[in-house]
Amino acid sequence: MTAALKAAAPGPFATLQDFGRRGSMRFGIPGSGAMDAEGLASANALVGNPPGTAAIEFAHAGGEWEVAAPSCRLAVAGGSFAAFIDGRQVAPYASHTLRRGQRLSAARQST
């Protein structure tokens, strides 16, 4: 499998998350999973993935990712983050198709 995204400047709290592994604590496996399950499901729906498909989850600080595949469909959902493609702000809760070399960045919005 070829990676679609390259972590150009990920924030310190960027992780890959899915819905986790519920019901396995008795085997020593914590539930884990996305802290914002609704955001994960929303972003996946926007790009046509099943709800629990793994995605990048970030908190407190966003980050920057570069598309390494010929194209990649992305969405930013959840939290108070502004999304930018090559420095131009784009709508959150919308899907965006990026081409190789383009960069998606997310930054915390001030309230």
Image (cartoon, rainbow, N blue to C red):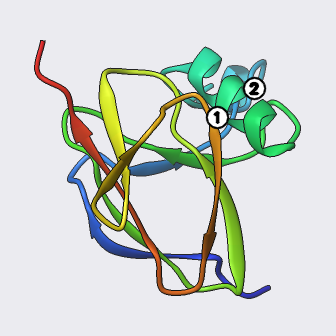
Relative side of 53 to 18, left or right: right
Rendering coords of residue 54 (x, y %): 68, 47
Residue ranking furthest to the left: 110
Q: Secondary structure at mark 1?
A: loop
Residues 52 and 108: in front is 108
From the image, tell me which residue sits under label 1. Answer: 29
Q: 94 above or below 1?
A: above
Residues 42 and 23: in front is 42
Q: Secondary structure at mark 2?
A: loop
Q: Where, by quadrant of the figure, is residue 70 drawn?
A: bottom right
Residue found 47% across the figure and 77% down from its top: 102
Q: Quadrant of the N terminus?
A: bottom right
* Disc on the earlier residue, 1 or 2: 2
Q: State the separation of the CA atoms marked 1 and 2.
A: 5 Å
From the image, tell me which residue sits under label 2. Answer: 24
Residue contact between numbered discs 1 and 2, judged by CB atoms under 8 Å? yes
Q: Where, by quadrant of the figure, is residue 64 drawn?
A: bottom left
Residue found 47% across the figure and 22% down from its top: 78
Residue found 48% across the figure and 86% down from its top: 101
